């Protein structure tokens, strides 16, 4: 049984409303929220409303088992029944790794109406790009804290619009995040020269 939740903060509710509004004009939406501000709760609340409205099937994709577990636990806390990807039978909500989706993409019968990509800054990798081609009628939602890549490659060919949240300074000022200190390396340091010399990159074009 899906239950409503009063655990969402005002900025999370605001972001959900912005996503729903953006979908009225765009197929593919990227959300930026800093680490620690509850992206997974926003994800679960959106899934909750899609399922409650009987608006179709949802596929949630992430690239690490830890993220899969976190998403699964959060969906469970929202009372959302979900399943992994297996065979040709699937529930209204499926949570799977991109590796599993990529291996089974050509032979599975899954036809999601909404595809949600966690840590969406990885979506430049070919394994993610093919999802847009595989399900041309599906809506897409990407969530990330860092909508930028070190190789300066953009996301505009995948996501139609970026919805940024409050700045980190605003979140700190409102008591959502704690103040912090950070340490940076010098521009001409040995560490920076080593980073600049790196040639091999990951599947998504970043280090």
Image (cartoon, rainbow, N blue to C red):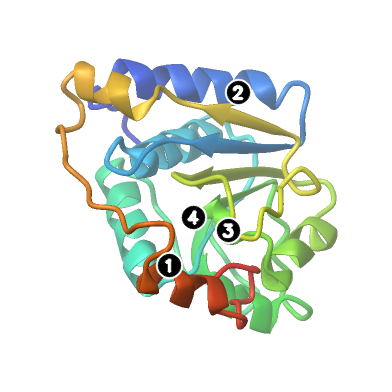
Which one is in front in this view, the residue at disc 3 or the one at disc 4? 3
Which residue is identified by label 2?
20
What residue is drawn where x is 45% and y is 25%? 165
Q: Secondary structure at mark 1?
A: helix
Residue 174 position, x and y percent, is 21, 16
Which one is in front in this view, the residue at disc 2 or the one at disc 4? 4
Mark 1 neighbour density, 10 Å: few (under 14) some (14–19) many (20 or more): few
Q: Closer to the N terminus: mark 1 or mark 2?
A: 2
What residue is drawn where x is 78% and y is 22%? 25
Q: Is residue 33 above or below residue 58?
A: above
Q: Which residue is more in the foreground, 129 or 73? A: 129
Q: Closer to the N terminus: mark 1 or mark 3?
A: 3
Q: Which residue is more in the foreground, 96 or 32? A: 32
Q: CA distance from mark 2 to mark 4?
A: 20 Å
Which residue is identified by label 4?
119
Q: Which residue is more in the foreground, 160 or 9? A: 160
Q: CA distance from mark 1 to mark 2?
A: 42 Å
Q: CA distance from mark 2 to mark 3?
A: 30 Å
Q: Secondary structure at mark 3?
A: loop
Which residue is identified by label 1?
192
Discs 2, 4 touching: Cβ within 8 Å: no
Instruction: Locate residue 106 relative to residue 21 in the image: left or right.
Output: right
Which residue is identified by label 3?
150
What residue is drawn where x is 35% and y is 57%? 186
Which one is in front in this view, the residue at disc 1 or the one at disc 4? 1
Q: Closer to the N terminus: mark 3 or mark 4?
A: 4
Which part of the image, by quadrant, shows the N terminus? Answer: top left
Q: Residue furthest front?
A: 188
Discs 1, 2 touching: Cβ within 8 Å: no
Q: CA distance from mark 1 to mark 4?
A: 25 Å
């Amino acid at each position: 049984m899906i239950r409503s939740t009063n655990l969402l903060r005002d900025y999370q509710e605001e972001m959900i409303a912005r996503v729903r509004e953006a979908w009225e004009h765009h197929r593919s939406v990227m959300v930026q929220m800093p680490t620690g501000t509850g992206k997974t709760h926003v994800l679960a609340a959106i899934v909750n409303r899609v399922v409650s409205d009987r608006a179709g099937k949802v596929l949630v994709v992430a690239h690490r088992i830890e993220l899969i577990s976190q998403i699964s636990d959060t969906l469970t806390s929202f009372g959302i029944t979900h399943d992994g990807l297996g065979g040709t039978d699937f529930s209204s909500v499926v949570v799977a790794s991109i590796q599993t989706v990529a291996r089974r993409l050509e032979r599975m019968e899954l036809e999601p109406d909404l595809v949600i990509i966690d840590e969406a800054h990885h979506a430049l990798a070919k394994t993610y790009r093919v999802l847009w081609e595989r399900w041309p009628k599906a809506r897409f939602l990407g969530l990330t804290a860092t909508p930028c890549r070190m190789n300066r490659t953009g996301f505009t060919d995948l996501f139609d619009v970026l919805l940024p949240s409050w700045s980190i300074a605003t979140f700190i000022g409102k008591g959502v995040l704690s103040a912090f200190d950070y340490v940076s390396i010098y521009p001409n340091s040995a560490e920076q020269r080593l980073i600049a010399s790196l040639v091999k990159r990951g599947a998504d074009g970043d280090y």
